Image: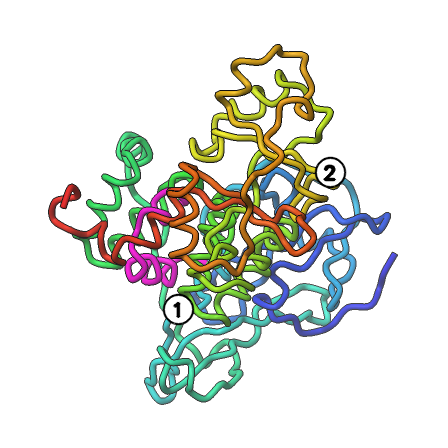
Amino acid sequence: MRTETITRIFLAKLAGTPVFDPNGDRVGKVRDAVTSLRSDRQRPRVHGFIVEVPQRRKIFIPITRVTSIDDGGLFITGSLNIRRYELGSGEIQILAEYLDREATLLESGERVIVEDIAMEISPTKDWHLSHIHILKGQRRLRRGVAETVEWHLIELDRHDHVIHHNPSESEALNNLPAQDLVAELHELELDRRAELVRSLDDDKLADVLEEMDDADRVELVSKLEGERVADVLSEMAPDDAADVLREVGSEKAESLLNLMEEDEAADVRQLLHYEDFSAGGMMTTDPVILPTDATVAEALAAVRQKDLAPALAAQVFVCRAPLETPTGRLVGVVHVQRLLREPPALSLGLVLDTQPDAISPDTGLNDVVKHLANYNLISVPVVDENDRLLGAVTVDDVLDHLLPANWRNTEERGN
């Protein structure tokens, strides 16, 4: 068992670090810490941590179960209670409540931005919130003076970020088509917009962000908690998530990527290496990919996936192993129309088109458009110099880049 412990921990830096069980196995990652504020301005005690385990389940680990905290992560003892955590009466999530919010320096009355909150261990082995790292000056440009002050010298603004919709209203919002919901949100003030979208399911909010224009999307993301944004980005197609991160700036993008699951963040990082208006910048990294010995029946089952976009469901890319992008060599493409005409037990290697007219990731937008038009395609494979499949560009990806940035906000969508 590890016994060493750092005496002061900054929680925003701790967020995203791994959690290990007594055997040294990784069981999840830290997302936030929980406390209850005191009315006497004394330092609040930290109750424990919200930890994300597989399947994105958020659980609670009491601080008494933590045996060590260091730069490598958080170490616990005992077995995990995997019941989904819900805040108790009077409890708050520290980072969700205060990170990137405004606060007031009590001595001067100056308004500042909270950049991190530290906790310290007391002689009684309890952890208390002790210091706040703040930014003074040009807050919006992040060019102010950074300083760490003691807890009692700051008046923190409470944010009521819990939505007070009744269940039927919240259900109605989630049932609205994303396009209609975006149109409704566009007419609202930013704070009200952020309040409403916090009641949405992650997959619905992902759809909403994909439908928003760039300016509205950046404003909204800036109002939401980093952990929530990271969860929503994970629900989005990698190319759409990359589009969002290109718009929020490199520093914010990196912090959000660090909060995402490693494998999902890796796909998005790969796309961020390419120019936005290139095939690499537009492509999705998760088309339908199967080996040559897969059958027609297996291919038809793969394209039936409920969440698969229609343009991606129209064809199967056949590759050598490995089958995760970047794959082994691209062997060919099989279109759904061909699959429907062939016996279910037939191998894909016998029915595929071995000349799939692939393009490189550096191909510009205009050339991608011409390529799709020349070959009457709704998607095109993107390969590297060794013919390994990197992803696919679909017609809807191209349209998003051809239309003007504010096309969704025109009074009549048909114009």
Q: Position of residue 52 (x, y in %)?
A: 61, 47
* Badge nearest the viewer, 1 or 2: 2
- Alpha-carbon distance for marks 1 and 2? 50 Å
Q: Earlier in the sequence, mark 1 or mark 2?
A: 1
- Marks 1 & 2, CB-CB < 8 Å contact: no
Q: Is residue 70 magenta?
A: no
> Which residue is painted at 20% across and 58% down in the image?
189
> Looking at the image, is 155 positioned above or below residue 281?
below
Residue, far left: 411
Answer whether residue 238 is visible to the viewer in this image.
yes
Q: Is residue 49 left or right of residue 412?
A: right
Q: Amino acid at mark 2?
A: Arg
> Which residue is painted at 55% across and 76% down in the image?
131
What span is colored magenta in the figure? 206-225
Local secondary structure at mark 1 = loop
> Looking at the image, is 395 positioned above or below residue 9?
above
The quarter of the image holding the N terminus is: bottom right
Q: Amino acid at mark 1?
A: Arg
Given residues 45 and 360, the one toward you in this image is: 360
> Looking at the image, is 181 positioned above or below residue 145?
above
Q: Which residue is mark 2?
A: 320
Q: Is residue 222 magenta?
A: yes
Q: Which residue is mark 1?
A: 101
Q: Position of residue 188 (x, y in %)?
A: 19, 53
Q: Quadrant of residue 259?
A: bottom right
